[in-house]
Amino acid sequence: MKIAISEKIKKLRKERNITQAELAAKFGVTCQSVCRWENGAAYPDIELIPEIAAYFGVTTDTLLGCDSESVENKIRKVFMLDIMGEGSVKDKITEMRKVMSELPYEPQIKYHILRQYHILGAEEAAKNISELREFAEFICASDAEFWIKHNTRVTMVDIEINEEACKPWLEQLGNDYMTPDDALLNRYEYQGQTDAFNQKAQENLIEGLTKIFLKGFKKKDDAEYNKAANLAILDMIDSMRDTSTDIDAWMRHRAFVKFRLASAEFSLGNTDEGYTELEEAVELLVKIAELPDGKVVKYNTPLLDLIERDKEWLISPVSDMVEQILTGPYGPWESFKVISDTERYKTAVERITKLI
């Protein structure tokens, strides 16, 4: 028993970053006594054993090294409860909590409990959100496997009480396996927020298809491919909106694509076609800029009838892109250099400069 308890005390102390002096002070013994406990030369007084076990958050059986079930088996039991166990979700949580009381420092157990609250639904998770945040923070700060940490963050995005509270989890999420945009899309579906889901789904679709079209595989510097890709995106945008001539949110997407199409045409030496696309892009920006401040616009497509945007949302990112063109051209806008001294280009620049 001396060997078992000595190894347990040493392991538990190191796992929790506690010094021998701190442990000694906690139980009113000397530092030398703790050292002797850990090297097997002595063991704690019998009345101290329950107190030491409670201090470390383990059972006395665990401290004494006579567990009836190994840690691995207990974690496996929780895992099986999560994915295959019979009974209600609340019953599973109760069983998992019993194991957690014995192994409070095992992140996997907290992870499986978190998953069960996610299954219970947003309302039930919200009632326990403070505790679930603590679980998630513990998991993400632990040495748990990457997939457990990743799934924990995605789960927290789903169950947080509002989008502001989601931000720390989205920032940690990065772009591995699931992007922040995709995680928000999942949240809207989980929370039953139909309008927000439709809006984000359409935005994600545009962004996703644009990346596929414009980057492709080994084709992002191919002007012919980029031209064809941008024409395909324009067709897609046109198919998503109706025939209304009123200003709408799709104008922003069209302006982006028109600038890219102009760049592709100039790269191919199709100067006249390039000017046409450039000037049409400028016209779109001018229309947006002429909107009254606070003007609300819609996507003008049946699926998104309830989604509204304002003028600032329409013009801000496009203006950022235009600023890159004007301060370059460089990178993807390198092709504009060949016409930078022409009157038509200077006129276009003069018009869009007023918009920045």
Image (cartoon, rainbow, N blue to C red):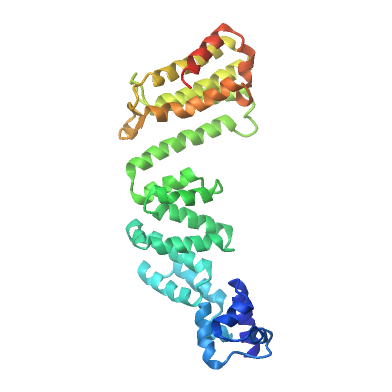
Q: Position of residue 243 (x, y in %)?
A: 34, 21
Q: Residue at x 63, y 79 (%)?
A: 10
Q: Height in image: 177 above or below 347?
A: below
Picture quadrant of residue 36: bottom right
Q: Nearer the viewer, residue 22 or 175?
A: 22
Q: Point out the residue furthest to the top here.
A: 343
Q: Is residue 58 visible?
A: no
In this figure, what is the number of numbered marks? 0
Picture quadrant of residue 346: top right
Task: Name the side, left or right, on which 133 lies relative to 35.
Answer: left
Q: Nearer the viewer, residue 33 or 106?
A: 33
Q: Position of residue 28 (x, y in %)?
A: 56, 86
Q: Is residue 49 visible?
A: yes
Q: Position of residue 171 (x, y in %)?
A: 51, 48
Q: Nearer the viewer, residue 181 or 74?
A: 181
Q: Height in image: 202 above or below 351?
A: below
Picture quadrant of residue 35: bottom right
Q: Residue at x 59, y 8 (%)?
A: 342
Q: Quadrant of the N terminus?
A: bottom right
Task: Name the side, left or right, on which 111 lies relative to 338.
Answer: left
Q: Nearer the viewer, residue 130 or 215?
A: 130
